[in-house]
Amino acid sequence: MAYTSALSAYRETRVKTASQGQLIIMLYDEAVRQLDWGIDLLQANAAGQRDPGKTEIIGKTILKTQEIITELMVSLDFEQGGDIAKNLFSLYTWFNKELLEANISRDIKRILSVRNMFNELRSAWAEIVAKTAAENMGQPSAGINIAG
């Protein structure tokens, strides 16, 4: 019980002290983690290990990812982000559409496609955050603009 409380407190502190860029990376990490879990469960079901309880979990992993995508969409700043924000919005919209259809049809390929693109975006954000941190070394931290 104490371990669970300590872990929860650590996670809360980590989120509260993170920069905007780090928060975006955390969202991407969680989206990839959810999709990986859903893919693993779908592959187990396809291998003949059908379990009705897992079917519900698969749906929840995809819905959780869609919630993360929605959070990323509403955090875009179109005034400062310009074309990058518009392009990200279009990509996030496509992600949500693909995941909706993949959830209905249980299409692993579609989920994998979104997962791989998420991972590429996560890598790009990690580079941006690292570069920004290196450039701001010794300066007060202003974070990065999530508009792109």
Image (tube, helix red, strand yellow):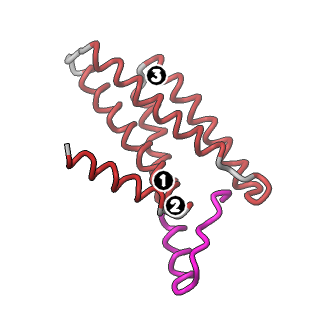
- Label 3 vs label 1: CA separation? 22 Å
> What residue sits 54% from the left and 29% below the top?
98
Query: Residue extending furthest right?
Result: 79
Q: Please, what is the three-letter code of the amino acid marked with disc 3? A: Asn
Q: Which residue is drawn at 49% across and 61% down?
A: 22
Between marks 3 and 2, how big is the CA–CA gap?
27 Å
Label 3 with label 2: CB-CB less than 8 Å? no
| Up-down relation of residue 37 to residue 79 (above or below) | above
Asked if the residue under mark 2 is in contact with the one under mark 1, i.e. CB atoms within 8 Å, the reply is yes
SS category of the residue bearing label 2:
helix
Residue, disc 2: 124
Q: Which amino acid does label 1 sit on?
A: Glu
Is residue 69 placed above or below 135 in the rendered structure? above
Q: Is residue 100 left or right of residue 12?
A: right
Disc 1 is placed on an element classified as helix
Instruction: Return the residue found at the far bottom.
Output: 138
Compared across the picture, whether 91 is left or right of 52 comes to right
